[in-house]
Image: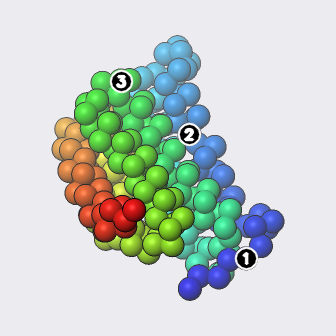
């Protein structure tokens, strides 16, 4: 069982999580810069780099917290919120620029809301272990974290059709999203049926 330390401590994992949250308005805001200040290609590049850095901090903060016993209740909460906010914010930007289909956005954002609510409810009834993160959810997250930066970058790179690869990957992520949501709902179903 992972030991939680005092929530009053500001440590490296917490700084990384707050950094990830700070990237959210920057990933969106870069697209509002005038073209005279920042070319469309540079906007794509900057948003891609910022999202990629945010994704790396996601993996890094959890690893550091576990490795050096720096986990806190606040950190665990913020980590989950930051992950969902970064992904959902990027998806909204991609829909606005017609790089992601609205159906994909609804699947990804809808799943995040549904599973977050499900986990909260399962925690209240003492069955949180039934819907803890599993391999399917992790693969879904990896697919998203590969697809989204590609779609933010969008431009061809060394002859590779990055936008096409990103589009294929986001559809794969959407299928995995539906599958993982079904896995979690089926695990929770016996508890949902109780009166």
Secondary-structure class at tag 3: loop
> Which residue is under mark 2?
24
Left or right of residue 7, residue 55 in this image: left
Instruction: Give the mark nearer the N terminus: 3 vs 2.
Output: 2
**Residue 155 appears in the figure:** no
Percent across and percent down for residue 86 are 50, 45
What residue sits 53% from the left and 20% below the top?
Answer: 32
Percent across and percent down for residue 24 are 56, 39
Camera-side residue of 40 and 88: 88
User: Mark 3 and mark 2: span between their CA atoms?
Assistant: 17 Å
User: Mark 1 and mark 3: span between their CA atoms?
Assistant: 43 Å
> Which residue is under mark 3?
97
Q: Nearer the viewer's eye, disc 1 or disc 3?
A: 1
What residue sits 57% from the left and 59% below the top?
Answer: 79
Q: Residues within 10 Å of mark 2 (few under 14, many from 20)?
A: many
Percent across and percent down for residue 23 are 58, 42
> Which residue is under mark 1?
5
Percent across and percent down for residue 59 are 49, 65
> Compared with residue 59, is residue 102 higher up or lower down, i.e. above or below?
above
Q: Residues within 10 Å of mark 1 (few under 14, many from 20)?
A: some
Instruction: Give the mark nearer the N terminus: 1 vs 3.
Output: 1
Q: Are marks 1 and 2 in contact (CB under 8 Å)?
A: no
Residue at the right extreme of this rendering: 8
User: Mark 1 and mark 2: span between their CA atoms?
Assistant: 27 Å
Q: Are marks 3 and 2 in contact (CB under 8 Å)?
A: no
What residue sits 32% from the left and 36% below the top?
Answer: 106
What residue sits 48% from the left and 59% below the top?
Answer: 121
Secondary-structure class at tag 1: loop
Instruction: Give the mark nearer the N terminus: 1 vs 2.
Output: 1
């Amino acid at each position: 069982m992972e030991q939680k330390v005092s929530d009053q401590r500001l440590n490296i994992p917490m700084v990384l999580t707050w950094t990830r949250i700070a990237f959210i308005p920057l990933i969106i805001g870069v697209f509002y810069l005038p073209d005279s200040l920042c070319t469309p290609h540079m906007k794509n590049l900057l948003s891609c780099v910022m999202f990629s850095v945010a994704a790396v901090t996601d993996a890094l903060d959890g690893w550091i917290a576990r490795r050096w016993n720096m986990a806190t209740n606040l950190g665990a909460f913020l980590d989950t919120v930051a992950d969902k906010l970064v992904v959902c914010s990027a998806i909204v930007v991609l829909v606005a620029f017609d790089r992601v289909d609205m159906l994909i956005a609804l699947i990804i954002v809808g799943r995040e809301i549904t599973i977050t609510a499900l986990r909260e409810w399962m925690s209240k009834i003492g069955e949180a272990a039934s819907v803890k993160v599993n391999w399917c959810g992790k693969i879904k997250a990896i697919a998203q974290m590969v697809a989204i930066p590609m779609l933010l970058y969008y431009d061809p790179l060394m002859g590779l059709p990055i936008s096409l690869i990103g589009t294929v990957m986001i559809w794969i992520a959407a299928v995995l999203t539906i599958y993982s949501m079904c896995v979690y709902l089926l695990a929770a179903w016996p508890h949902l049926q109780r009166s």
